[in-house]
Amino acid sequence: MPLFRRRKQEAAFSARTPDSALASDHELASDSTQAHLAAALVAIKDAKLGEDVWLEIERHLLSADLGVPTTHRLLESVKAEATSSAHALELLRQVLVNNLAASTSLSTEGSPAIWLVVGVNGVGKTTTIAKLAKRETDLGRRVVLAAADTFRAAATEQLQMWAERVGVSVVHGSEGSDPASVVFDAVEHAAANSADIVIADTAGRIHTKSNLMDEICKVRRVADKASGRVAEVLLVLDATNGQNGIAQASVFTEAVDVTGIVLTKLDGAGKGGIVLSVQHELGLPVKLIGVGEQITDIETFRPEQFVDALLSDAVLSDAVLSDAVLSEVSPMR
């Protein structure tokens, strides 16, 4: 069984939402990536190290959506030390894990802590917010949702539906009202009622439209002035969008100072290589992953498991990693 496969452990909501049409059997994207990438690397492992091997590794890393800059940087690191094809794959694992080693914790500083959730339409923002609300309430925290996507007619209705099912309150305005005001009111409501976290939905901004990005900048500025503290700005990216997600992340980071990524639809359809590109090119940690459509299908991103799911067949099957390599990598989980 792949390292990232998980079965449902508890009853979950069966309702689907427009931005959560995902596969029902929950397997991380590495299932699909692993199938073509690890199988190819297994053949490489016993080949004589040379230019042909490097080209094959490069080709398969690119096919996994790592992107050209990230792939070239990784190969440069490995080429300098590799003594054989098998050793090259061991070193590749080490470099991948080390590059993904970043804090995945979510800050709850502030009274309340404010989490702004941003991203383009269709990536799964609203569903992600519902999953976050469920996760935090299960941890004993009081959560308030802010329905600040006032431009989409069904957005508030959808968030209210999820809020009712999760058991949290939601603050909203009328259709077309000022999104920043909705967030401000939600934060003040949360503060008055001793809630711990406000999770704010925002409109699905088209990241190439400057006037729409200006609006979300205003939301951030107003949230900073409210009670509490903006503790997280989470950018939701669709794993199936590949390298287009880098362009989205770059613009959103410049506009609202993104603190971390939530990667959705990482359940068999996406290749997952965008994880490394986002971390390398923008310095943004992937904090959470969406691995299915159910309310509990959100997990903390674990770099070692992700890399092992990509490379385990090639690196770990019928082989023992050298002590020299393992000594520089955290123990496997």
Image (cartoon, grey):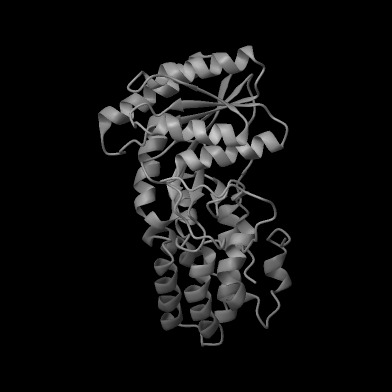
Percent position (x, y) of residue 244? 34, 52
Question: At 70% across and 38% down in the image, what residue appears?
Answer: 138
Q: Is residue 175 above or below residue 233?
A: above
Question: At 49% across and 50% down in the image, what residue appears?
Answer: 264
Q: Is residue 105 above or below residue 23?
A: above
Residue 110: image quadrant is top right
Q: Is residue 115 visible?
A: yes
Position of the C terminus, as image quadrant, is bottom right
Position of the N terminus, as image quadrant, is bottom right
Q: Which is more toward the observer, 195 or 287?
A: 195
Q: Is residue 5 above or below residue 47?
A: above
Percent position (x, y) of residue 290? 54, 50
Percent position (x, y) of residue 266? 50, 57
Q: Is residue 106 visible?
A: no
Q: Is residue 171 left or right of residue 228?
A: left
Q: Is residue 331 left or right of residue 307?
A: right
User: How many numbered discs sit on the rendered protein?
Assistant: 0
Question: At 33% across and 25% down in the image, what residue appears?
Answer: 215
Q: Which is more toward the observer, 125 or 175?
A: 175
Percent position (x, y) of residue 126? 47, 38
